[in-house]
Image (cartoon, rainbow, N blue to C red):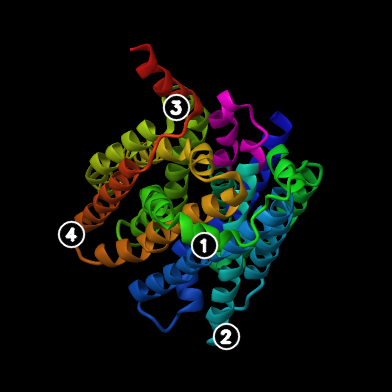
């Protein structure tokens, strides 16, 4: 299990590295380089719009790769999705700027961002299912949390490289070529991930379905026809996690460097501390999910997120590194209380024959609702001269939406369901 979970974690970290390095670049340099004819605010909005394209592509990627996973196995998804995302990311680092090729530059940027999202849309479902379907039932939450550690690790890799470049280069050097280096590094990381994953075996659950000839012929159609409510509820439930994460890691970076004049190196360091704490506590929270259930932790996480959004914005507005780090860490702890358990929770909501499609589409639908819009909406709401309280109100609204959706979803933890089944009989 440790080998399987580690391979899933490594691949997920690499794919999310690819995805996050674009978000950091969008916050720091893509606006003036690819939309120079826009005002600074409009350029940032345009850069974040190209960032959002990746989220729009993710549900499509989850449908395509989910079909492969439910029809042909979870393992092929791990390999093809990683290769696609890696190639697209390296290509982003090679795109000429607007000054070189004009309007073709942002067009190429959008196309490659779409391919990034397509690959990442398939990654999560494959990585989580390979781990969860190999795991023993009573520790499924713990092992399925390993792919959930991948995003923090990927973020730290992306921002660690960017932080090093930012500290070692002048602003002119960073804007000229330094921002491209993290994209080029994705090629080496993708090769390492493919090497780690090539030895991972197909899951016992899928092999059983294949032997019995019970695999779904059209898994997306089956999900849409028989589980559309579950799909919508799971997408809405996960929206707050995406909204909070990208408010912290992408919007805050742009807002603080542009409006508060905080040095970008300081901001990257503050955000990285919060993300590192989030990654460290993920398996601990997942163990609680195995013991006490997935749904209660999700409800607690949504509530904590709703309560923390105004303090988060207030602490960001101080421009003090210690206080900003406190705000970031509190926000990310609220969202990871949910996301630590969804690696087990979402697959358990769907029957095995359509699990790869259902879980992946639901997960990435949450990304569209919460992740694609948040940097754009937050940047627009924070465009005035005063504190961006509108951003806090928006995030509270998303948290309440997710809270309501989680309240409508059932509990799935085998231990909790078994206890609930025996208690009435004992009474």
Q: Earlier in the sequence, mark 1 or mark 2?
A: 1
Can residue 164 be seen here? no
Q: Determine whether the residue tagged by mark 4 lies in a helix, strand or loop.
A: loop
Does label 2 or label 3 sit earlier along the sequence? 2
Q: CA distance from mark 3 to mark 4?
A: 49 Å
Q: CA distance from mark 1 to mark 2?
A: 26 Å
At label 2, counting other C-alpha atoms closer than 10 Å, the crowd grade (few under 14, some 14-19, many 20 or more) is some
- Marks 3 & 1, CB-CB < 8 Å contact: no
Taking depth in this image into account, of 388 and 411 the one nearest to the observer is: 411
Dot 3 falls on a residue whose secondary structure is helix
Q: Quadrant of the N terminus?
A: top right
Residue 102 image offset from top left, x and y in percent: 55, 87
Tell me which segment is drawn in magenta.
130-150
Magenta stretch: dominant secondary structure: helix
- Residue at 61 percent across and 37 percent down: it is 132
Q: Nearer the viewer, residue 198 or 20?
A: 198
Which residue: 40% across, 47% down?
241
User: Label 2, on which residue?
Assistant: 104
What residue is shown with label 3?
A: 417
- On screen, residue 229 above or below 55: above
Query: What is the C-alpha distance between the residues marked 2 and 3?
Result: 55 Å
How many numbered marks are there?
4
Q: CA separation, marks 4 and 2?
A: 37 Å
Residue nearer the viewer, 419 or 346: 419
Residue at image position (80%, 47%) is 198
Mark 2–mark 3 CB contact (< 8 Å): no
User: SS at mark 1?
Assistant: helix
């Amino acid at each position: 299990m440790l080998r399987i979970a580690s391979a899933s974690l490594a691949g997920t970290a690499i794919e999310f590295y690819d995805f996050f390095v674009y978000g950091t670049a969008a916050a720091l340099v893509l606006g003036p380089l690819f939309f120079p004819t826009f005002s600074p605010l409009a350029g940032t909005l345009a850069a974040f719009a190209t960032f959002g394209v990746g989220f729009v592509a993710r549900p499509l990627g989850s449908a395509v790769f989910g079909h492969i996973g439910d029809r042909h196995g979870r393992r092929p998804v791990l390999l093809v999705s990683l290769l696609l995302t890696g190639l697209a990311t390296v290509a982003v680092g090679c795109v000429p700027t607007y000054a070189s090729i004009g309007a073709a530059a942002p067009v190429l940027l959008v196309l490659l961002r779409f391919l990034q999202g397509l690959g990442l849309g398939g990654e999560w479902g494959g990585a989580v299912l390979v781990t969860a379907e190999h795991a023993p039932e009573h520790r499924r939450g713990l092992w399925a949390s390993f792919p959930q550690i991948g995003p923090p690790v990927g973020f730290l890799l992306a921002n660690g490289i960017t932080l090093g470049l930012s500290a070692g280069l002048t602003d002119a050097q960073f804007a000229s070529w330094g921002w491209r280096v993290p994209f080029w590094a994705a090629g080496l990381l993708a090769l390492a991930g493919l090497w780690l994953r090539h030895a991972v075996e197909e899951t016992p659950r899928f092999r059983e379905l294949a032997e019995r000839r019970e695999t779904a012929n059209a898994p997306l159609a089956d999900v849409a026809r028989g589980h559309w409510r579950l799909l919508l509820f799971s997408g809405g439930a996960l929206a707050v996690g995406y909204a909070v994460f990208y408010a912290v890691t992408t919007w805050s970076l742009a807002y603080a460097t542009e409006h508060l004049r905080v040095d970008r190196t300081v901001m990257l360091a503050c955000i990285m501390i919060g993300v590192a704490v989030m990654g460290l506590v993920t398996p601990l929270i997942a163990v609680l999910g195995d013991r006490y259930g997935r749904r209660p932790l999700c409800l607690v996480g949504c509530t904590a997120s709703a309560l923390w959004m105004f303090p988060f914005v207030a602490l960001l507005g101080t421009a003090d590194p210690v206080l900003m780090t406190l705000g970031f860490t509190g926000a990310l702890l609220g969202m990871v209380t949910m996301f630590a358990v969804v690696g087990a929770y979402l697959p358990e909501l769907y029957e095995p024959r359509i699990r790869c499609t259902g879980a992946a589409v639901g997960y990435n639908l949450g990304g569209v609702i919460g992740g694609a819009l948040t940097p754009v909406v937050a940047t627009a709401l924070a465009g005035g001269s005063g504190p961006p309280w509108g951003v806090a109100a928006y995030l509270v609204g998303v948290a309440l939406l997710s809270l309501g959706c989680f309240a409508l979803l059932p509990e799935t933890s085998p231990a909790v369901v078994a206890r609930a089944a025996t208690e009435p009989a004992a009474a």
